[in-house]
Image (cartoon, grey):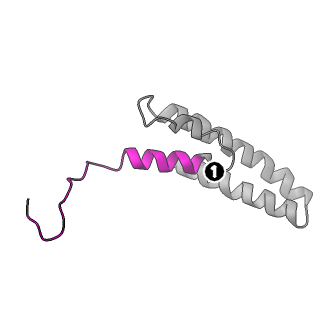
Amino acid sequence: MRALRIAAAVELVTLAALLLNLATVHTGAVTALGGPVHGTAYLVVIALTWATAPAHTAPGTRPRAVVPGIGGLLVLRRLRGTTAGPARQPTGPPGRAR
């Protein structure tokens, strides 16, 4: 999970840097460095998702990994929701004992 978090963050940050560069000065060095780093992070997110997310995980977890830019964050959100720990016991309205 830690590697997936790092790869998702790198994917998002490099995409933001590339888009900011494109919208402003369009420096070739930023593109030359950021493009391959972003592409590698994107592929790492996909590979880690398919390697670590079991097939019985919530439906749609694996396909979310291929969403460019934010796929890693979507996967982490989905995985966090399904593996957040033991289920909480439902509680009644405040003031009522069960």
Return the residue found at the far top: 55
Residue 1 appearing in the image: no
**Local crowd size for mark 1, using a 10 Å CA cut-off: few (<14), some (14–19), many (≥20):** some
x 63%, y 40%: residue: 44
Residue under the point 53% across and 51% down: 5
Residue closest to the eye, 91 or 1: 91
Please provide percent x and percent y for residue 64: 58, 40
Q: Residue 58, image x and y in percent?
A: 43, 37
Rendered residue at 70%/42% (across/down): 40
* Left or right of 95 in this view: 69: right
Up-down relation of residue 73 to residue 44 (above or below)? below
The residue stretch that appears in magenta: 72-98
* The quarter of the displayed image where residue 56 is located: top left
49 up-or-down from 3: above or below: above
Residue 1 location (% of width, % of height): 47, 46
Q: Position of residue 17 (x, y in %)?
A: 76, 60
Work out whether residue 96 or residue 74 is closer to the camera in this orientation and state it.
Answer: 96
Q: Let me know if residue 79 is in the magenta part.
A: yes
Where, by quadrant of the figure, is residue 42 drawn?
top right
Can see residue 21? yes
> Outermost residue, left direction?
97
Residue that badge 1 annotates: 70
The local secondary structure at tag 1 comes to loop
Q: Is residue 43 magenta?
A: no
Q: Is residue 23 left or right of residue 49?
A: right
Q: Residue at x 91, y 61 (%)?
A: 26
Query: In the rendered image, which quarter contains the C terminus?
Result: bottom left
- 47 up-or-down from 21: above or below: above
- The three-letter amino acid code for the residue at tag 1 is Ile
